[in-house]
Amino acid sequence: MDKLSRFLNFASLSSSSPSPDPRRRPVTPPDMQRPRSNVLTLLGLPAEIVHQIFTLLDPISLADVSQTCHLLRSHADDDKLWYDIVQKHVPAQRLLSPGPCNTWRDLYAAYHPYWFLTHHKLWFSDKANTGSALTGSLIIARFDPRRACIEAYRLVAEHGDHTFEQWPLDSHVIIHAFNPRVRLWLDDPIIKLDLSSAPPGKRLQTEILMPTGDAQGIRSKLFRSLRIPPVNQKKSMSLWPPEIIPTSERVRNDSSNRFASDSQKPKTLAEASDTTFRIRKWMEFGSLGVSIGLRMGEDVMTFSTLPEDCCAPTEGKPWQGIWVGDYSGHGCEFLVVLQRKKGAESSNSRSSSQESSSSRAFINVESASDGTGTAGQDDTDDREEEAPYSGRLEAIKLTGDPNVPRGEYTFIADDIGRKGFIRIAEERPFTGARVVKSRGHIAARGFVDHSYIPSELIMISHDRLAQYWVEFGHISYYSRVNIDEYLTFNS
């Protein structure tokens, strides 16, 4: 019996027993107390210490130890333990009740093994909801305590007023205004799991039918993905997420049968990826809510998340996190900005191939023409090298467009310290901003003939950036997005 089956068996047996009062911790009954001896055992420890030990166990281990004896079962049923476990998977909001479930343990069991969805909260896909493999989509997963359900919605951004002004430094350059309105698209849930969604039995291999898109005749199923260990990843494989995006796990991104076979799904929790999942979508025809069984347009979307430390700024990396940018006719696009220390390789050893030879040639030409790396450059004022102005900024698209798709660099500032320093802006609206060399990624439609062109990154604040696309003669803005703002129910 694998770990998941043992846990579900434990949960079903436990749910039939009276609900313990979460305010009271179990006390060892007198007739079950062990005689004192020089050998200290778990059963002989005070209830408070046993509880403290159990707080260190994961849910599966807690279920395992509960099967050993009645005394440990009474400790494992302590609902305070299960409240802490559930709360850990629901960031940015404080849970008050397990209702409509009787206990927190029952609530956890109802959605196991899908709590990773709300735990990681931010997910980006290889395809858009329309099936486009270039644009992708960004969704926010959260737990709704009002209905005790797990749900996820697309994060969308509206540009705002399309106004512009001339750049005082060069009247031929246009500055495009950008005041985006970022919100969740609540009319069309991408994920919706309620207490009736999770089927009994083999949850890891079962595709869960979700009540989404019914009015449009669109059906969708959620299912777990089979992780590919790094040792088994080959250059010839199509993997998600792309290698320039940091992650602990990757999964296959193509399948001749659209991942329909059991061999393409995890059989155990150890095989299941906790940082990716899939959604199968199709259109089903019928009338008056009755399906006639005709399916069309079936496709599978693969989602991945980011390491938690990439999603928000830190004291040493104040520009790191999730941003939304202005891409003119393509609209708003979301990206992750990574701030890397000097000498750190970009993402991994194979991702450097994402940067074309034209990009590397551009760096060499720039270095030769401006004396970067020479003794004169090294004599630049030390204040320019002080943190946080050090290292490299990489901006990677999480959603894309027909020219430069999701999963590709949109710009790179190789050194925001003294080697990349250009000037401190004195003109409005960038007064006081640090300006550094950068490279903008461009391509023809379909990501054809992509290359990097000279650009300048204007570092206005930790929440606002601007990119001067030199060859195009315009400046566009980027604004930070705080993901936690969309996990509560005021958004």
Image (cartoon, rainbow, N blue to C red):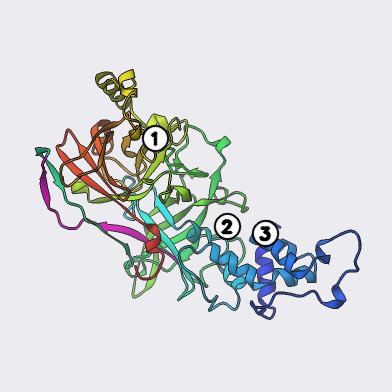
The label shown at residue 204 is 2
Residue identifier under label 1: 391
How far apart marks 1 and 2 lie (CA) works out to 42 Å
Instruction: Give the structural element (helix, strand or loop) at label 3.
Output: loop
Q: Earlier in the sequence, mark 1 or mark 2?
A: 2
Look at the image and tell me whether residue 450 can be seen: no
Q: Are marks 1 and 2 in contact (CB under 8 Å)?
A: no
- Residue drawn 36% across and 66% down? 213
> Residue 163, relative to residue 248: is it above or below?
below
**Residue 104 location in percent, x, y?**
59, 72
**Residue 302 location in percent, x, y?**
43, 50
- Residue drawn 57% across and 57% down? 204
Query: How crowded is the residue under tag 3: few (<14 C-alpha within 10 Å), some, or many (20+)?
Result: some
**What amino acid is at disc 1?**
Gly
Number of the front mark, 1 or 2:
1
Quarter of image, res 409: top left
Closest to the observer: 188 or 156? Answer: 156
Instruction: Give the structural element (helix, strand or loop) at label 2.
Output: loop
- Does the magenta portion include 167? yes
How far apart marks 2 and 3 lie (CA) works out to 22 Å
**What amino acid is at disc 2?**
Leu
**Magenta-drawn segment:** 151-168
Apparent side of residue 196 relative to residue 45 in the rendered image (left or right): left
Instruction: Give the structural element (helix, strand or loop) at label 1.
Output: loop
- Residue drawn 80% across and 65% down? 45
**Residue 63 location in percent, x, y?**
69, 64
**Residue 114 location in percent, x, y?**
53, 61
Residue identifier under label 3: 57
**What amino acid is at disc 3?**
Leu
Number of the front mark, 2 or 3:
3
- Residue drawn 28% across and 32% down? 421
